[in-house]
């Protein structure tokens, strides 16, 4: 990982050598099958994947997916009526990106110190790992798990409630407009979602896009319904 500085000082984190990754990944997967609290397991697996960094790009996105996937596989996110529920923890994590990076740095900084890095030219470097690299295999997950639990609580209290409110509002607007106008379901659904995302306005682009299939009064009716449900 690069921090924007020039030369060797610009290297903020170096993942384990490839031969270490082959050893780390199966142990990370085993965490999913051990008797560990699902939230703790999700935090460990998510951050361990970032540390292992098996791909050139996309490790952060995949790590957040693994957090949700681990919770889903645990069976703890199932509801009697809706099946498996997706808790928007990654939304909260994105909102607290600086705290997330600080939690990662508690491991990434010591791991960087395991390496001698010599800048050759441009983007060419020579890397030498000092020691056995044990910290890559054994690390303290406390900070990562603590952060994950904090974000889970915030997602429950704020983000999940916000999503529920949006769905309730969507249903109310849909019923109001559908009771008066005959509009294709998919068109009406898209226009209402666009209105919700645009703070109560159906944009000029959307009006133009659907001008041939949706009567002009429908756009105004959607906006009016948004105001009435606000």
Image (cartoon, helix red, strand yellow):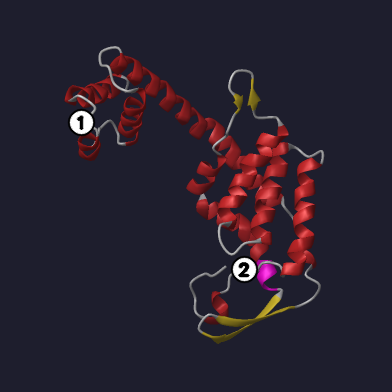
Residue 75, magenta (yes or no): no
Q: Is residue 164 above or below residue 40?
A: above
64 or 207, which is in the foreground? 207
Q: Which mark is residue 223?
A: none
Image coordinates of residue 25 in percent, x first then y, are: 75, 56
Residue in the picture at 53% in, 80% down:
123
Q: Secondary structure at mark 1?
A: loop
Q: Which residues are magenta?
A: 109-113
Q: Is residue 138 visible?
A: no
Rendered-image quadrant of the N terminus: bottom right
Q: Which residue is mark 2?
A: 13
| Marks 1,2: beta carbons within 8 A | no
Q: Main secondary structure of the magenta part?
A: helix
Q: Residue furthest top?
A: 179
Rendered-image quadrant of the C terminus: top left
Left or right: 44, with 209 as reference point: right
Q: Secondary structure at mark 2?
A: loop
Q: Nearer the viewer, mark 1 or mark 2?
A: 1
Q: Residue furthest front?
A: 212
Q: Is residue 156 above or below residue 89?
A: above
Left or right: 16, with 186 as reference point: right
Q: Residues within 10 Å of mark 2 (few under 14, many from 20)?
A: some
Q: Residues within 10 Å of mark 1 (few under 14, many from 20)?
A: few
* Sooner in the amino-acid sequence: mark 1 or mark 2: 2
Residue in the picture at 54% in, 70% down:
2
Q: Which residue is mark 1?
A: 212
Q: Residue furthest left?
A: 216
């Amino acid at each position: 990982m690069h921090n924007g500085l020039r030369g060797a000082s610009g290297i903020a984190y170096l993942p384990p050598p490839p031969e270490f990754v082959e050893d780390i990944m199966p142990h990370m997967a085993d965490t999913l099958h051990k008797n560990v609290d699902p939230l703790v397991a999700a935090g460990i697996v998510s951050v361990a994947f970032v540390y292992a960094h098996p791909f050139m790009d996309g490790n952060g996105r995949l790590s957040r997916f693994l957090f949700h996937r681990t919770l889903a596989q645990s069976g703890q996110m199932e509801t009697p009526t809706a099946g498996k529920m997706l808790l928007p923890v990654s939304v909260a994590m994105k909102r607290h990106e600086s705290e997330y990076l600080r939690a990662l740095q508690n491991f990434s900084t010591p791991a960087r110190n395991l390496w001698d890095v010599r800048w050759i030219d441009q983007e060419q470097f020579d890397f030498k790992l000092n020691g056995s690299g044990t910290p890559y295999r054994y690390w303290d997950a406390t900070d990562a798990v603590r952060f994950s639990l904090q974000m889970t609580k915030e997602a429950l209290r704020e983000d999940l409630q916000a999503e529920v409110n949006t769905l309730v509002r969507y249903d109310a607007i849909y019923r109001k407009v559908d009771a008066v106008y005959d509009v294709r379901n998919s068109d009406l659904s898209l226009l209402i979602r666009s209105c919700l995302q645009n703070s109560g306005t159906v944009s000029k682009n959307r009006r133009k896009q659907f001008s041939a299939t949706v009567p002009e009064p429908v756009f105004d009716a959607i906006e009016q319904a948004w105001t009435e449900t606000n």
